[in-house]
Amino acid sequence: MTTSDKIAIGHQTQHAEMLRALQGQKQAIGYMAFTLSDGSLPWNSRRRREILKALCLAAVFEGSDRSRVLVYEALRRHSRSHPQEVLGIVTSIEARFTEMGDVADVDRGKRRLSALRAALAKQSAKGAA
């Protein structure tokens, strides 16, 4: 195994750990969101999109307001450089909730998506000022 193979495996492992943490308990979600808000996303578009999806889903499913605030902040920060990706993911989740709203109670999820959109708009308004 070459050094570059070892580095690639290390990056894959780190990426998988990030995704797992964003699907875990509130402390792990909060920690990973805080870490991601201070760092950069992967340059690989597929990996970046996976992280952004995991953050958006954490914004919807996480019950802890404190963890959600950290998730919102990470998404706000990264929506500056990847606005279409973030908004595309949010729109996709909203569309699924709307489509299945007659067979499941998705009101809480819709409220959380609305709060996420408000947090993202706050960033846009800040950047425009």
Image (cartoon, grey):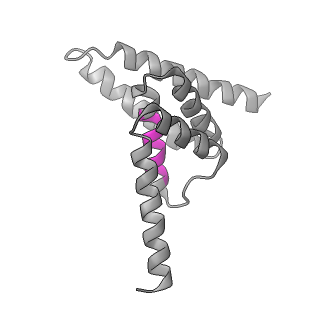
Residue at the bottom extreme?
Answer: 2
- Where does residue 30 sit, x and y in percent of width and height? 53, 35
Horizontal arrangement in the rendering, residue 120 relative to residue 28 (left or right)? right
Identity of the residue drawn at 62% across and 42% down: 37
**Residue 55 is a magenta residue:** yes
- Where does residue 29 sit, x and y in percent of width and height? 48, 37
Q: Which residues lie in the magenta part?
A: 48-57
- Judging depth in this view, the residue of 4 and 26 nearest the camera is 26
- Where does residue 109 sit, x and y in percent of width and height? 38, 20
**Residue 121 is a magenta residue:** no
State whether residue 19 is above or below residue 127: below
- Judging depth in this view, the residue of 70 and 102 nearest the camera is 70
Look at the image and tell me in which quarter the N terminus lies: bottom left
Total numbered labels: 0
Identity of the residue drawn at 58% across and 26% down: 69
State whether residue 123 is above or below residue 109: below
* Dominant secondary structure (helix, strand or loop) of the stretch shown in magenta: helix
Look at the image and tell me in which quarter the C terminus lies: top right
- Judging depth in this view, the residue of 114 and 74 nearest the camera is 74
- Where does residue 33 sit, x and y in percent of width and height? 55, 39
State whether residue 43 is above or below residue 97: below
Identity of the residue drawn at 50% across and 43% down: 85
Identity of the residue drawn at 53% across and 43% down: 32
State whether residue 41 is above or below residue 5: above
Residue at the left extreme?
Answer: 103
